[in-house]
Image (spheres, rainbow, N blue to C red):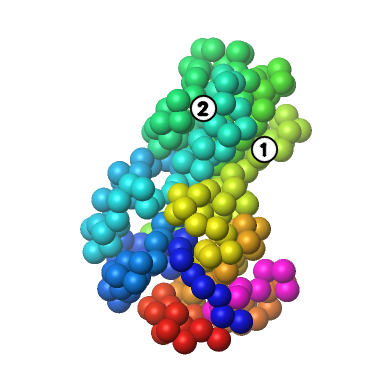
Amino acid sequence: MARAIDGIVFDIDGCVARGNRAIPGVPDTLNELRRRGIRFVFITNDNQNEVAYWVHRLAAMGIDTSEDEVLTAAIIAARATRELYPTRKILPIGDVGLIEALRTQGLELLDLEDAKNAEVVVMGKDPDFDLRRLNLVCQAIWNGAEFIATNDDPKVPTATGFVPATGALVKAVAYATGKEPIVTGKPSKWAGEMAMKILGISPDRGAVAGDRIPQDIAMGKRAGLFTILVLTGGTTQEEAADAPEALKPDLILPDINHLLEWLDNPS
């Protein structure tokens, strides 16, 4: 069934790029989408880096974008925190990307020395996370603080294999405290809905394109978006066919470049 698309949420790695290189043809495809007036935003579960990092990284691949078109897990968590707890005292556990995002929302941030006064813990991947920080975070939550996590990815790929991701740290806190966090990044409903707010369109006019069913497609389903799976990353055609009915993508494309053809002849 044809569906009008006014805005698209693009996953980055495996969808528009592989590592530090754009997938061939993607920059031209994105330029054509702009020419047609279709808005888009790039989404990533990275919560450590500032938005400027992603603008620069995409530009180096030939993908021109602005800070308003990049949505990190840190930004999603910060906006969600602002919506849920606008006047609470926040204990941030994470890197520069998370701190910047929370400050941009005008939230009251505490230092570790004041952890006992925290009313909300917002946690991303903290490169300095150790037993001391684990204890401080747990003490804050045991004292009644709410718990928000940017995402719960267990690992991320590297050139030589994998490294532990945010989820490994978040699970340690959840296990110790017995309190599961509100997870705001992909594949949460928060992520998809926030992308639509940034684009200024209704979910029934939006789409998400990505290469992973458990993250990208699941997020789209939860947010009421049209879901597009591309086969340039972490999912094969066979895996897509075997996906649970609730997670079956609405459209499967060999790559993002085939999106233009589909937009011209939707079926």
- In the rendered view, tell whether residue 18 sits above or below residue 66: below
Residue 127 appears in the rendering: no
Q: What kind of residue is marked 1?
A: Pro
Residue range (magenta): 245-252
Residue 214 appears left or right of 158? right
Q: What kind of residue is marked 2?
A: Pro
Classify the position of the N terminus by image quarter. Answer: bottom right
Give the residue drawn at x 36%, y 48%: 68
- The outermost residue toward the right is 178
Mark earlier in primary sequence (2, 1)? 2
Give the residue drawn at x 47%, y 40%: 74
Q: Does the segment drawn in magenta span residue 247? A: yes
Q: CA distance from mark 2 to mark 1?
A: 14 Å
Residue 90 appears left or right of 145? left
Circle number at residue 225: none
In this rendered view, identify the residue nearer to me: 256 or 195.
195
Give the residue drawn at x 30%, y 51%: 66
Classify the position of the C terminus by image quarter. Answer: bottom right
Judging from the image, what secondary structure is the residue with disc 2 in? strand
Judging from the image, what secondary structure is the residue with disc 1 in? loop
In this rendered view, identify the residue nearer to me: 176 or 11.
11
Residue 202 appears in the rendering: yes
Give the residue drawn at x 47%, y 87%: 265
What residue is pinned by disc 2? 92
Q: Position of residue 87 (x, y in %)?
A: 57, 21
Circle number at residue 181: 1
Q: Position of residue 170 (x, y in %)?
A: 61, 38
Quarter of the image where one finds residue 2: bottom right
Quarter of the image where one finds residue 168: top right
